[in-house]
Image: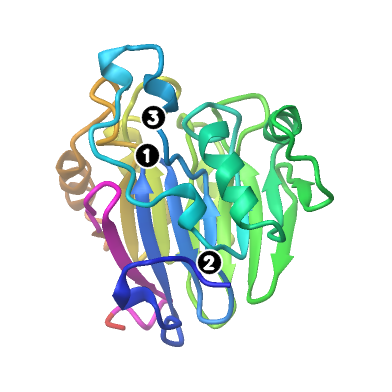
Amino acid sequence: MSAILPAQFDSPPLSGTAHVWWLGQGSFVFKGPRGGPLAVDPYLSNSCGKGGSPGAQRLFPEPVAPADLRLSGLFLTHDHLDHTDPDTLIPLTQANPDIPIYGPPASVAHLAKIGITEERVHTLRRGEAATGEGWTVHAVHAEHTDDSVGLVFVFDNGPTIYHTADTLYFEGIVDAAARFAPDLLCICINGRLGNMNVADAARVTAALRPTEALPMHWGLFAGNTADPQEFADAVAASGAPVRTVILTPGFGRHIAAARGRADA
């Protein structure tokens, strides 16, 4: 199956590249040359704003309806509402009845509570990996909840993408992902509610030295955002040879490339 994506993403990615669609917050769709699309933490509702808090209302509309996405796999990083969201996951999984779903124990338990208990749901803990057609995903430590995970997507004949998930800076965050030599780093920068701030995110980026860094977890909620240009400036000031990719929240698309294919 293929995702309903912008027109330029209808065809498979070129060899050595992957399509990246940032849905906002920590939500992405990745598609490699031989596998995907894979979604991470899709948040395509206004669940967080139901309590009426102005700071938790969406600042932009959902870029796609959950039931309109067609996926090959779904990954969850932790059990917070903007990452494991019933209002998104119920219609999305109903529209994709055969896709495998992976997440840490707390997210898997949440899925069971909302009736998603099929054999396709798999627990993915830190240090474990999942494999599908054209991809392998490694779960690494994320310092956010008791069992939260960051995810390293390795696409066959394509790039490696490290999604930090929500996380604070911690000793070992660089080592956890460095062995995979990520080409693209998707990194949280908002500095609130258990996440790295701009300075810490730039510090991780400079140490990992991916080809590109994509700041995420900003721009969706007025009460929990940051300035991505400050991150780009901090990375540049570090002297690390890393290109910062700033996308439009929800509607930004990018083509990531494996090392040696940065001009693809």
Q: Which residue is mark 3?
A: 46
| Amino acid marked by disc 1 | Gln
Q: Position of residue 163 (x, y in %)?
A: 48, 50
Q: Which residue is mark 1?
A: 25
Disc 2 on helix, strand or loop? loop
Q: In the image, which residues are magenta? A: 245-262
Q: Which mark is residue 37?
A: 2
Q: Quadrant of the C terminus?
A: bottom left
Whole-number angstrom distance, CA of label 3 to CA of label 2: 24 Å
Q: Is residue 71 magenta?
A: no
Question: Residue at left 51%, top 74%?
Answer: 32
Instruction: Judge depth for marks 3 and 1 and give the one in front.
Output: 3
Question: Does 243 appear above or below 1?
Answer: above
Instruction: Judge depth for marks 3 and 2 and give the one in front.
Output: 3
Snapshot quadrant of residue 38: bottom right
Magenta region, main secondary structure: loop
Snapshot quadrant of residue 34: bottom right
Q: Position of residue 29 (x, y in %)?
A: 46, 58
Question: Does 187 appear above or below 133?
Answer: above
Disc 3 on helix, strand or loop? loop
Whole-number angstrom distance, CA of label 2 to CA of label 1: 18 Å
Disc 1 on helix, strand or loop? loop
